[in-house]
Image: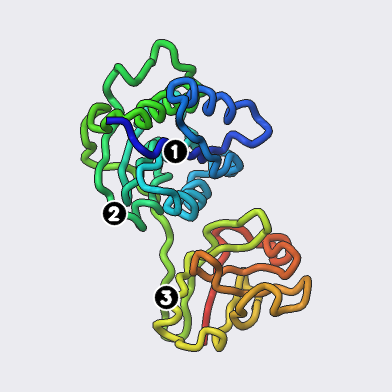
Amino acid sequence: MARQTLLATLTTDFGTASPYPGAVKGVILALCPRAQVVDITHDVPAHDVLAGAFILVQSAPFFPPETVHVVVVDPGVGTQRRILVGRFGGQLYLFPDNGIITLVAARLPLEQLVVVRNPEYLPAAHASGTFHGRDIFAPLAAQLLNGLPPDNLGPQPDTYTLLDLPLPRETPAEVVGQVLYVDPFGNLVSNIPAEMLRDRWPELQAVRVWCAGREVGPLQPAYGFVQPGQPVAVVNSMDVVEVGVNRGRAAETLNAGVGAVVRVAG
């Protein structure tokens, strides 16, 4: 039976100025004309699986049930890396088996997972070795939108790839984490959940934050609570600690990026 929700999203590192997103959309719409295709982003930094995983988990869960999320951040394109289809939290994800599903899998329940092996859906003879997004992922997405059961694509794998992500650690005096993502505003998004801090310090504005060895100051409700150009620490919309600069770029101001140490102390 065909889906009632014919909605697909695209998350790629193709770049918005390239012809590649348009080609993928064209294939999906040619095979499923009733589909609506929504761009989550095509500006994942090239080959950056962790950034893609972070962007995906902050966007995809807000879409309606039965949305098909097409995820093509795929440094291993053309190799023997596997292509998977997973159902997490009532939505379908089509993705390379390179760890990009890690944060989705950590947040949402896994309800189904298959490896795409059925040769009917893997046109190897006609697929470009460098553009599986167009030649494999897009036709698969259209088939799923048209009602193809994922089980038809192949068997359930014994395992699948997850990134080995750093976790924040607690000491008697502080919580120590690190920057996982730098957003387009230059904000430094950490892996320290606010819930971990609330368990220790009920009054969050009483705690202080350091990033890349520099004291940022107490947690503030929003960026505008410090003067323009000044660093600021907030609990962001993702409910994790973030270091920014009011009307500036923390990445440049603090000379910090992914992996920079973030410390929080009472």
Query: Element type at marker 3?
Result: helix
Closer to the eye: label 3 or 2: 2
Q: Residue furthest top?
A: 125
Q: Is residue 250 above or below residue 265?
A: above
Q: Is residue 105 above or below residue 25?
A: below
Query: Element type at marker 1?
Result: strand
Please provide percent x and percent y for residue 263. 54, 75
Q: Is residue 98 above or below residue 162?
A: above
Please rate how many residues cluster around mark 3, counting C-alpha atoms within 10 Å: few if below 14, some from 14 to 19, many from 20.
few
**Mark 3 = which residue?**
195
N-term-proximal mark, 3 vs 2: 2
Please provide percent x and percent y for residue 89. 32, 51
Q: Which mark is residue 175?
A: none
Identified at 64% across, 62% down, the residue is: 187
Relative to 103, 55 lies left or right: right
Q: Is residue 254 above or below residue 155?
A: below
Please provide percent x and percent y for residue 24. 52, 27
Identified at 39% across, 46% down, the residue is: 101
Relative to 82, 266 lies left or right: right
Q: Amino acid at mark 3?
A: Glu
**Mark 2 = which residue?**
109
N-term-proximal mark, 3 vs 1: 1
Please provide percent x and percent y for residue 72. 48, 35
Identified at 43% across, 40% down, the residue is: 69
Q: Amino acid at mark 2?
A: Pro
